[in-house]
Image: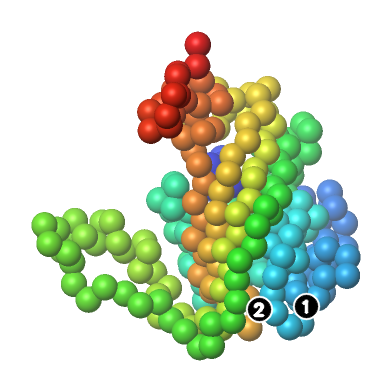
Amino acid sequence: MHLGYFDDMKDVDINTARRRFLRQTGAAALLGSASAIAAPGATGGFKGEGRMGMSTGEDWIDTFFNGGADAIIHFYADEFVFEDVTLFQTIDNKEDLYRAFLPFGNAGPDSPAGVHQFDVIRYDGGLAGDRRGVTRDAPPEHYTPALWAQWSDETLKGAAYDYDEWAVMNWVWKAQHNMDFLGLPAKGKTTFCRGITFHAYKNRKIVREFTHWNFREVGVQLGALEPQQKFWLKGWQPPK
């Protein structure tokens, strides 16, 4: 999702961006990252107590806007792996992650990245004891080691990290674009997109994240792709 703007942010000086962010939002945003930025009355957010739940998802999503990069970065453990499966990108250090989140710290009506709204639709999650990812021992049939590594190495990153709780969040992303998006003409357009994020937590910090979002549907809305032909539905006819 936000990695769609990564090319525009990769050369940004982080210290300059941090100072600009604090000038725009005030020091309270940074202080908020050390306390709690959560839905009112929530006890299950990242700084809460007990089982994590819907408030965790709302906490995570809301902090994109209410706290920006300076706040969201503290939701991740010192050792973590973030993965945007759609864009085939992983991040495992906070410097790069901070830069990746910066576009949404400046998401006003006139900002280059436009106006973005994320809303959690559904949260599934629970305690996990003390678990790690279980990985395949060897490449499957008809894969060379090199080919298998090409398609599996990203997923395997962070598999050794313990986690004690997990979550799957379904969400919807509304984007009002002020610039092209992933090479597609998008300025002045509004798109909607479904997505899903898996989190593995350790001590209420994210140690592993997988996010997948429906780029194809965004491409349809921007006129780059044809709508899905739902031939499997009885009586379905393509729209005219």
Is 111 left or right of 5, judged from the image as shown?
Answer: right
Give the image location of residue 82, x and y in percent: 51, 63
Res. 237 visible in picture: yes
Mark 2 element type: loop
Give the image location of residue 27, x and y in percent: 86, 62
Mark 1 element type: loop
Is 131 left or right of 104, judged from the image as shown?
Answer: left
Res 98 label = none
Q: Quadrant of residue 157?
A: bottom left
Which residue does the numbered mark 2 point to in the structure image?
A: 204
Q: 239 and 103: which one is in front?
A: 239
Q: Which residue is drawn at 75% across and 66% down?
A: 55
Q: Do the residues labelled 1 and 2 touch (CB within 8 Å)?
A: yes
From mark 1 to mark 2, how far is it between C-alphas?
9 Å
In the rendered image, the vertical position of residue 188 relative to residue 66, given as above or below: above
Give the image location of residue 34, x and y in percent: 78, 74
Q: 85 and 79: which one is in front?
A: 85
In the rendered image, the vertical position of residue 59 relative to residue 100, given as above or below: below
Q: Residue at x 26, y 56 (%)?
A: 150
Q: Determine crowd level at label 2: few under 14, some 14-19, many 20+ residues with C-alpha closer than 10 A.
A: many
In the rendered image, the vertical position of residue 58 relative to residue 200, given as above or below: above
**Residue at the outermost front position:** 234
Label count reads 2
The colour scheme used to paint the residues is rainbow
Which residue does the numbered mark 1 point to in the structure image?
A: 48
Give the image location of residue 218, x and y in percent: 54, 33
Say which amino acid is labelled 2: Arg
Say which amino acid is labelled 1: Gly
